[in-house]
Each structure stands twice: as C-alpha cells, then as structure tokens.
Image (tube, rainbow, N blue to C red):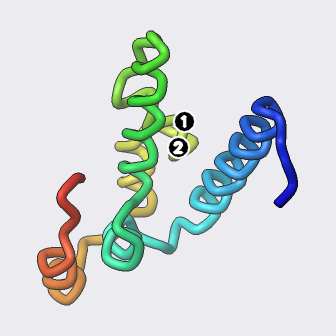
Amino acid sequence: MTELTKEQQTEFEAAAFRRLVRHLRERTDVQNIDLMNLAGFCRNCLSNWYREAAEAAGVDLSKDASREIVYGMPYEEWKNLHQAEATDAQKAAFEMNKPAHG
C-alpha cells in the first residue's frame, strides 16, 4: 500500500467527500429513505457527521447549516423540490432495517 502523509490523506478524503456530496446533489431522484434502506445512511446522516466533526473541532455549526452544506440549499427547499412521499414498501423496509442511529 502506498504510504500517504497525513496531509495527503486529509486532502484525498476531502476530495472524496466533495465528490460524494456532488453526486448526491445530482441524484435528486434517489430518496433518503432509499439510501437508508440500502446503505444505512442518508444525506441527513452525512450532514450530522459533518456537524459532529465541526463540533469536535470546537466549531459551532447548526443542523440547518450542515444540511445546507450537504444539500446545496436549505433542507426545506430541497424537500419541497425533490422529496416524494415514501411508499408503504419503503416504510416497511425502513422499519425492518432501521439503523440504531438516525
């Protein structure tokens, strides 16, 4: 395995994060419940992890601000534009596979 400096590791992780966020912003057809059912995390989880990292570094970042970083717009606006009502099948799958966190 290639040895990376701490700076390289951080740079590459940040680039991968930015690409993931860009991908999720482009794939508005993929609902959060689908992500939760398939992968056990969604855009909201990602924004929570971002906020938790900021807080661990002593930076106060609100839930709304961290969601806007991930969604590229205020969360309520994204929901109004892109979020569909979950189907009964999606809700049932979520209940069966619900992660311990949310």
Q: Is residue 59 above or below residue 92?
A: above
In the foreground, 96 or 67? 96
Numbered mark located on residue 69 in the image:
1
Q: Residue at x 14, y 81 (%)?
A: 96
Residue 54, percent from left and from top: 47, 22
Q: Is residue 41 above or below residue 14?
A: below
In the foreground, 10 or 24? 10
Q: Secondary structure at mark 1?
A: helix
Numbered mark located on residue 70 in the image:
2
Q: Is residue 65 left or right of residue 91?
A: right
* Cα distance between the residues tagged 1 and 2: 4 Å
In the foreground, 4 or 21? 4
Q: Is residue 88 above or below residue 30?
A: below
Q: Residue at x 51, y 46 (%)?
A: 71
Q: Is residue 68 above or below residue 38?
A: above
Amino acid type at image mark 2: Val
Label 1 crowd (10 A; few <14 / some 14-19 / many >=20)? some
Residue 21, percent from left and from top: 61, 51
